[in-house]
Amino acid sequence: MQLIDGKATAATIKQEIAQEVDRLIAAGARPPHLAAVLVGHDGGSETYVRNKVLACEACHFTSSLIRFEDTVTEAELLDCVSRLNSDPAVDGFIVQLPLPPHISEQKVIEAIDYRKDVDGFHPINVGRMAIGLPCFVSATPQGILELLRRYHIETSGRKCVILGRSNIVGKPMAQLMAQKHLGDATVTVCHSHSLNLVHECRQADIIIAAIGQPAYVTADMVKPGAVVIDVGTTRVPDPSRPSGFRLCGDVDFDTVAPLCSYITPVPGGVGPMTICMLMLNTLAAANHSIYA
Ligand code: GUN
């Protein structure tokens, strides 16, 4: 079994990005600028956004954090999106999800200029991704593809089972894994209403678990030699930790890992790669390499 080290891979990629940014600055450009909008004080969202700001520093980007209390109105948030859309000093921005229930996430996502949508959530980017056109691709699936590529894990013609059908991970992952010249795999998407889910998983050469249920994937679901990618990051209470919680993946790591050819840990697997891909998307936005 080989552990896929997302943390180390992400550190390498961030160094590569920083070198590219230094070259751009030496040639007279300003650093890429990512803005993040954070509503409320959800612990997970605070951590994600803090890590995104730290990643910007590592990549020699400029970052801005725009904060709102969770009493912000939808109109105020849409106004902020509109200002960021037209601010020439901002190359790309994200609105951290989830948003409070009185705000329509879809309305906010659709208000973002797709050319600055470095999360790749706007329907134009989602649609272009689906038909293989250049676009901003959602960072988690992109990070998983990059890990598979850097570890020389063959996906072409392999059977890939994706657990979860979310707009952010499951759906784009399925499309990218099936796409020619990318995953080129035979893809099955399983979800909460799938019959024979255990049987489907047992056929898989590659399992990508993104259902948000701690330790859901157990040893009986995994074919010996399979590659297992764990997207789960559920916070479970752990009084022995200073934070009071630990992150738990969707895979029961201790029993599944011995069966695998490759497996990602949680933390230190997919998570750091996701943030790295956001940085790559921001660099592409600054360079206008996807949209002129
Ligand atoms: N919430 C959880 N993951 C993400 C993400 O990738 N982007 C944004 N904007 N919010 C999230």
Image (cartoon, rainbow, N blue to C red):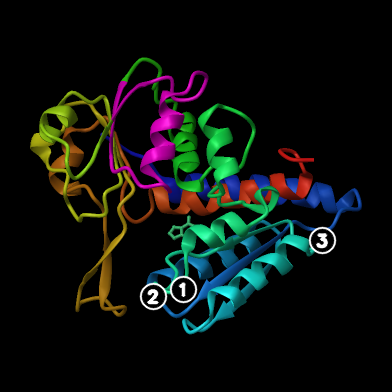
Quadrant position of the N terminus in the picture? top left
Q: Position of residue 96 (x, y in %)?
A: 50, 65
In 3D space, how far apart are the residues under numbered discs 1 and 2 (Cα atoms)? 5 Å
The residue carrying pointer 3 sits among few (fewer than 14), some (14 to 19) or many (20 or more) residues within 10 Å by Cα, namely few
Above or below, 141 against 238 in this view is above
Q: Is 62 included in the stretch rendered in magenta?
A: no
Q: Position of residue 85 (x, y in %)?
A: 72, 61
Q: Circle 2 is placed at which residue position?
A: 43
Can residue 166 be seen here? The reply is: yes
Relative side of 28 to 23, left or right = right
- Viewed as shown, does residue 48 lie left or right of 267? right
Q: Is residue 219 positioned above or below 276 on the image?
A: above
Depth check: give the residue in front, 217 or 4: 217
Q: What amino acid is labelled 3 in the image?
A: Pro
Q: Which residue is mark 3?
A: 88
Residue 282 shown left or right of residue 108 in the figure: right
Secondary element under disc 2, as helix, strand or loop, is helix
Q: CA distance from mark 3 to mark 2?
A: 31 Å
Magenta-highlighted residues = 159-188
| Camera-nearest residue between 289 and 126 | 126
